[in-house]
Structure formats: C-alpha cells, structure tokens
Image (spheres, rainbow, N blue to C red):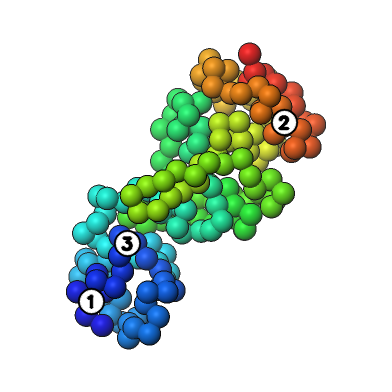
Amino acid sequence: MKYDNLTKVIKTPYFSLKDHSLHGQKLFDYQINLWVKKGHLLRLKNGMYAFTKDKKRIKGEEIAAFLYEPSYLSLESALAWYGFIPEMVYAYVSVTARVNRKFTNDFGAFLYRHIKSELFWGYTEIKTEHGHYLLAEPEKALLDYFYLNLPKISNEADFDNLRFNMDTIKEKLVADKFLKYLAAFGVKKMKTWALQCLP
C-alpha cells in the first residue's frame, strides 16, 4: 500500500491497525515504520497512529479516549476542566475499569487509573469533529478523586493542601446528585471530606 492510498482508505485523522477499513489491505510494519520516520505518521502507541498533517485538528481528549477503552476523563483533568483546582494539568488523566496504564506521545502524557467496574459511571459524552470522548460529571470527578486519593487525606491539613476552589465547587455541584453518588461509593471515610464540598 502507498501512503496516498492509506489517506484515502482511512477517513479519520487517527487510526488503529485493527481498523476494519484496513482489512484486506496489504499494509506492512516496515511501511508504517518508514512513514513514521518520514514524518507522515505519529505513533500514539503500538498499533495506533495519527496523520501528522491532521495534528492541529486533533484534541488530546479524543486521543485519551482512543488509546485505552473503556475510559473517561476524570480526576485532575476533569477537576481542572470544571475549575475545581487552580493548577494546569499537564497530563490527560482518566479512570478505567482496566489496569493502570501510562502512554506518552506527541499529544502529551496519558494516565489511566483503575476503578472497579461497579463505579464506572457518572460521565457525559462530548461530541467532536472526529468522534467523541467521555468526561466525568462534576460530582463524579470529585468523588473519583476522593476515592482514589483517600489514603493521602487523613486530616484537615491534608484536605487544605488539595487547594480546591471551594467557591466554584459549591456553586457547580448538584447536591442531590452528589449525595446519591457518594452513597453509591459505599466508602464511609469519603463522607467527611465530600460533605465539605457542599454549601
């Protein structure tokens, strides 16, 4: 297969070698490696690539969803999205029902933290030009954070060190939903810190 043919077969700016549109095509590893070396393709991880010419059209959030499924953006990424923390986040942080993983490529660092499958909910779908990605709801993002970081929060000083924008949190959280989600986690130790986030 020639590179020009690849761009005609693949209609999206990023793709997997398992893409159904490549079935039956003669595409060899040495060709992919050559196109990466020539700068035509960006390697996202083994078996997944993006077209260099389309890089500016691709959102990192899309790549986060594409690299490791099922997953949704949460924790620091979602907290920053909603303005719940003041710091910029230099990685795309997601939760997944699969094992922890980390990938680094031209679009940034992508972290995936494991959460049990019974807690894999509370997200919304964000449509993009090329597809979609999943983003935790404000209430779920905050509770995911408490759940996965609870060992680091043992007293008020630890809680204060989280540097949450409490005014923004109290303004945006839907109390009934937050309490319902909190109960679904079933972790008593979360309650002390979670309730401080309500008006």
Residue 5 tag number: 1
Residue 12 tag number: 3
Quarter holding the C terminus is top right
Q: Secondary structure at mark 1?
A: helix
Residue 119 sits in quarter: top right
Instruction: Tell me how far mark 1 sits from mark 3, CA to CA.
Output: 14 Å
Q: Secondary structure at mark 2?
A: helix
Q: What residue would you read off at disc 2? A: 180
Q: Earlier in the sequence, mark 1 or mark 2?
A: 1
Task: Check if mark 1's residue and mark 2's residue have beta carbons within 8 Å.
Answer: no
Instruction: Sort mark 3 into few (<14), some (14-19) or many (20+) by Cα contacts within 10 Å.
Output: some
As shown in the figure, which amino acid type bears the numbered disc 3?
A: Thr
As shown in the figure, which amino acid type bears the numbered disc 1?
A: Asn
Q: In the image, residue 50 lies at what x, y percent?
A: 32, 62
As shown in the figure, which amino acid type bears the numbered disc 2?
A: Lys
Q: In the image, residue 159 lies at what x, y percent?
A: 63, 24
